[in-house]
Image (tube, grey):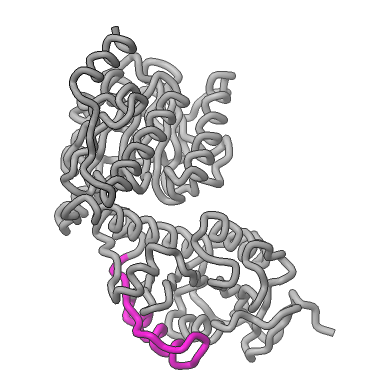
């Protein structure tokens, strides 16, 4: 008798994929838990699949609570179309199969109904992924598939035809979104980045005209500085171990607070005059371990690791400001919305906002991309936060907790300002209250 995890027939020919060691059941379960936890789908909505090295498709089941999926709920569909498992496969299995047939390079698919992308779906639009260089590189030019009945062969055909044109992220008219990737982790990162881009566009639309990037601006970031030279560090002392744990803990906290996304966000903390630990490049911010952060010492990076692209910026800030011991680059939706349009972010909303943020700085895209020293002069102990145009926000502090606190206050202030738009004109604190705050808190 064939077991659920056995494979019938010969290994199908397929393009080489990154070596995955996590079982398909666990990968599907963990990814759906993450999507559901962050309200990017509903109890009944959405489905995930991946194609294994044998060509079998593993997919989430039909009519099972997305908030309570177990690993044994997952279904394997073999090359003959026979389903193995305790439930029927998702009713959208036909379009998963059609996409895989059209795109042999894809190994995983995410379909869900996150609210921002659904908003684009029901207005027959696709988000402009040129809002950020990262979203352009991660998502590419999005596609748009016309409406067809869910679960139907017609839906599979229109979606597969759109993917066949080379799109990796596709808006479904009056339905939601489908994204593909080489692995499930790759597909999830694309899905989350796509939704973040859509959310930011919607939020920024309440503030004024939105600026997107030109080919020249995207290429400017792609050029970037050369990699830092490598060195082999000696044994880690207690201070470095504490710093690594702190970075991991606050990255997870920032992700759960939706201040970071899996593909974006950098955090560092200083260990000495020219020595700090920073998050690695291209690593899931929720899944970091203490081994992952990169030690930077004297302008050199720990051998065998790639530090965040923000490493030179953080080094410049530390060099310019001895009082600053932690720096965070973040992608919080509401504050980032101000960074993609010309509307100023006025911190004179409530006392906490002004005391923590003072005057919110703004840095042009070109400066943020090419001139770390100029950015370092923009922020400081009395100017702890800045908007980086089309690249998120920056927060600094005497330690990681204070930098993180500034980031949270910045995001809350931005959200309050955006939420106030339908209510009426904002009435900021006047000169008198500001003078009182300056005297009480800053002497």
Q: Position of residue 13 (x, y in %)?
A: 54, 81
Q: Position of residue 314 (x, y in %)?
A: 33, 29
Furthest residue in direction right, as rendered: 1
Q: Quadrant of the N terminus?
A: bottom right
Inspect this view and state whether residue 392 appears: no
Horizontal relation, residue 415 to residue 386: left or right: right
Q: Residue at x 46, y 36 (%)?
A: 303
Q: Residue at x 33, y 57 (%)?
A: 197
- Residues drawn in magenta: 140-166
Q: Quadrant of residue 224?
A: top left
Q: Nearer the viewer, residue 391 or 309?
A: 391
Q: Quadrant of residue 291?
A: top right
Q: Residue at x 51, y 81 (%)?
A: 96
Furthest residue in direction top, as rendered: 443
Q: Quadrant of the C terminus?
A: top left
Inspect this view and state whether residue 439 appears: yes
Q: Nearer the viewer, residue 199 or 78?
A: 199
State whether residue 198 is above or below residue 106.
Answer: above
């Amino acid at each position: 008798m064939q077991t659920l995890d056995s494979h019938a027939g010969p290994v199908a020919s397929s393009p080489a994929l990154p070596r995955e060691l996590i079982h398909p059941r666990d990968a599907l379960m963990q990814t759906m838990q993450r999507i559901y936890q962050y309200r990017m789908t509903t109890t009944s909505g959405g489905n995930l699949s991946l194609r294994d090295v044998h060509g079998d498709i593993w997919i989430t089941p039909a009519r099972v609570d997305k908030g309570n999926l177990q690993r044994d709920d997952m279904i394997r569909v073999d090359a003959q179309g026979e389903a193995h498992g305790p439930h029927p496969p998702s009713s959208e299995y036909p379009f998963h199969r059609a996409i895989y047939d059209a795109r042999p390079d894809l190994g995983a698919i995410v379909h869900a109904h996150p609210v921002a992308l659904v908003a684009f779906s029901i207005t027959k639009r696709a988000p402009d992924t040129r809002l950020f260089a990262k979203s352009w590189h991660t998502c590419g030019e999005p596609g748009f598939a016309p409406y067809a009945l869910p679960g139907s062969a017609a839906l599979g055909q229109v979606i597969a035809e759109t993917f066949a044109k080379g799109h990796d992220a596709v808006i479904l008219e009056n339905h939601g979104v489908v994204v593909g990737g080489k692995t499930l982790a790759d597909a999830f990162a694309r899905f989350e980045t796509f939704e973040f881009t859509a959310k930011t566009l919607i939020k920024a639309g309440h503030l004024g005209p939105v600026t997107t990037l030109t080919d020249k601006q995207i290429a400017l970031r792609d050029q970037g500085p050369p990699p830092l030279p490598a060195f082999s560090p000696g044994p880690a002392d207690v201070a470095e171990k504490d710093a690594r744990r702190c970075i991991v803990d606050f990255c997870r906290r920032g992700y759960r607070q939706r201040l970071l996304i899996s593909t974006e966000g950098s955090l560092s903390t200083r260990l000495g005059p020219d020595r700090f630990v920073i998050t690695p490049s291209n690593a899931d911010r929720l899944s970091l371990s203490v081994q992952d952060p990169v030690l930077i010492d004297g302008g050199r990076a720990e051998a065998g690791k790639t530090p965040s692209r923000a490493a030179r910026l953080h080094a410049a800030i530390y060099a310019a400001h001895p009082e600053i011991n932690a720096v965070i680059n973040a992608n919080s939706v509401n504050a980032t919305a101000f960074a993609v349009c010309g509307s100023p972010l006025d911190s004179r909303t409530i006392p906490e906002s002004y005391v923590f943020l003072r005057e919110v700085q703004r840095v042009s895209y070109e400066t943020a991309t090419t001139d770390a020293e100029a950015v370092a002069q923009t922020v400081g102990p009395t100017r702890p936060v800045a908007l980086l145009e089309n690249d998120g926000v920056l927060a600094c502090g005497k330690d990681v907790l204070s930098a993180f606190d500034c980031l949270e206050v910045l995001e809350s202030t931005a959200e309050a300002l955006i939420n106030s738009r339908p209510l009426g004109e904002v009435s900021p604190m006047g000169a008198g209250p500001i003078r009182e705050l300056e005297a009480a808190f800053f002497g």
